[in-house]
Amino acid sequence: MRIQVTRTGGFAGHAKHAELDTAARPDAPHVHALAREAMAGGLRAPSYGVPDGFHYEITVDGRTVYCADPKLTDSQRELVGLVMREGA
């Protein structure tokens, strides 16, 4: 599974992009479950949360959803953190 996250917004407005491939990960089943839950809770169009908050575009195997702080689900928050921390 290929997971891509783009984060925009914040005070500086800089975009950050990270990508994670789960093919060789020992925790792949957990990451796949997170991705399914995160996608189910996402919106089909960009959403805007609070001023200067972060906005996220999550793409899993070619399908994209959108979410924004502070309205991330637990799964979205965990998935975004994982991909941003460990993705390339």
Image (cartoon, grey):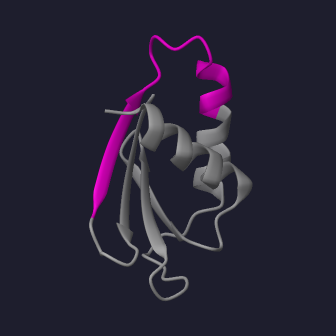
**Residue 87 coordinates in the image, percent (x, y):** 39, 33
Q: Quadrant of the N terminus?
A: top left
Which residue lies most toward the bottom here? 51
Where in the figure is residue 48, as x and y percent of width and height?
48, 83
Q: Quadrant of residue 36?
A: top right
In magenta stretch: residue 72:
no
Q: Quadrant of the C terminus?
A: top left
Up/down of 77 relative to 11, above or below? above
Seen at 54% across and 86% down, the residue is 50
**Which residue lies most toward the right here?**
74
Is 78 rendered above or below residue 23?
Answer: below
Q: Residue furthest left?
A: 14
Locate residue 42 relative to residue 87 in the image: left or right: right
Image location of residue 75, percent across then percent down: 68, 49
Which region of the structure is painted magenta? 15-32
Question: Residue 37 location in percent, x, y?
Answer: 68, 48
Q: Please name the residue shown 58% across and 44% down the image.
A: 79
Residue at 54%, 70% (x, y): give it: 43
| Number of numbered discs visible in the structure rendering | 0
Please determine whether, in this image, residue 78 is positioned above or below residue 21: below
Write down the quadrant of residue 20 in the picture.
top left
- Would you say residue 28 sits in the magenta stretch? yes
10 vs 75, nearest the viewer? 10
Q: Is residue 20 left or right of residue 32?
A: left
Q: Residue at x 38, y 78 (%)?
A: 11
Is residue 22 positioned above or below 69 on the image? above
